[in-house]
Image: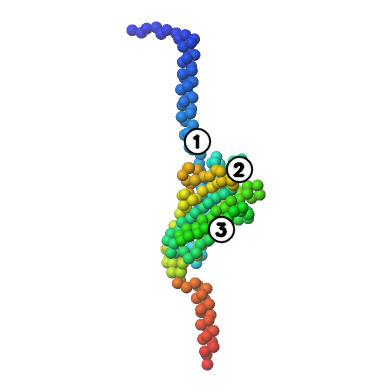
Amino acid sequence: MSYPTKPLSLRERVAEGRVRGVILALLVLTALPTFAAVVAPDVVTIGTAVNSGLTADVPVYIRDTSGSPLGIDQPFGSRIQSYSIKVDYAPASAIQSVTFTRAGITQSLTPAFESSPASAGSITLIDTFDETTNLIPFTSNAALPGNQVGKLHFTFAPGTLTGTVVTLTLDPTLTQLSNQAGTTSETVTKGTLTLVNGTLVQTQDIPLLDPRILILLGIVLALIAVRLRP
């Protein structure tokens, strides 16, 4: 048996509307962190190189992703104007020397500060640029890997064999991007930076002596042979 439903009074209808409004507001607030989490981070990438000589260059890139805390799409004071990029390479025994310098969109810029500290098996490039006079001209949402900002120049150690693979790994703690003032940073820990590692492959044996020394030695021996002729 069904019973007739008593119509709600005006006061009851107003109260019910308020409850529904509160529930809707809570649902929206709950969903906000989910929406914020979908913003893609900026990306630092080490290139991959296949080499058949004594030296090799490996490019380093930064991709400026729109919507991230720092970027060319952000207002003055919130752009990528400083970076610290630390690269660990292994096996260190395969590398005789390495340098890390500016390249690509930063090559022609004048840094306010620059340093490239190195130790066995690692090297870092640290640059800071004045945003007013040396804005880093990133392309927002450029195709991966982004804009080249640096270059690693490796010299292989004598005796390095064909097929040697040198892994190039970005340090997740010391690799970070920031604004000029250093008040805003992007890091792996914060979830605002993604790192992509690279490799360097040697496809020929490196002689125990520098090829230039071998050539010079050959010339000297040839001259000696000429002089010794009767």
At a point 48% along the width and 55% down the height, the residue shown is 87
At a point 44% along the width and 57% down the height, the residue shown is 167
Q: Are marks 2 and 3 in contact (CB under 8 Å)?
A: no
Q: Which is in the foreground here, disc 2 or disc 3?
A: 2
Q: For residue 223, which quarter of the picture?
A: bottom right
Q: Is residue 223 visible?
A: yes
Q: Percent position (x, y) of residue 44?
A: 51, 50
Q: Is residue 201 visible?
A: no
What amino acid type is highlighted by mark number 2?
A: Gly
Q: Residue furthest right?
A: 133
Residue at mark 1: 36
What amino acid type is highlighted by mark number 1?
A: Ala
Q: Percent position (x, y) of residue 12?
A: 46, 11
In the rendered structure, which disc, 2 or 3, sits on the residue that comes first in sequence? 2
How busy is the neighbourhood of tag 1: few (under 14 within 10 Å), some, or many (20 plus)? few
Label 3: state its secondary structure: strand
In the rendered structure, which disc, 1 or 2, sits on the residue that comes first in sequence? 1
Residue at mark 3: 101
At a point 37% along the width and 7% down the height, the residue shown is 3
Q: Nearer the viewer, residue 189 or 206?
A: 189
How busy is the neighbourhood of tag 2: few (under 14 within 10 Å), some, or many (20 plus)? some
Task: Tell me if residue 108 comes above or below residue 183 in the rendering.
Answer: below
Q: Which mark is residue 170?
A: none
Distance from disc 2 to disc 3, alpha carbons, whole Å, reads 25 Å
Residue at mark 2: 77
What amino acid type is highlighted by mark number 3?
A: Thr
In the rendered structure, which disc, 3 or 1, sits on the residue that comes first in sequence? 1
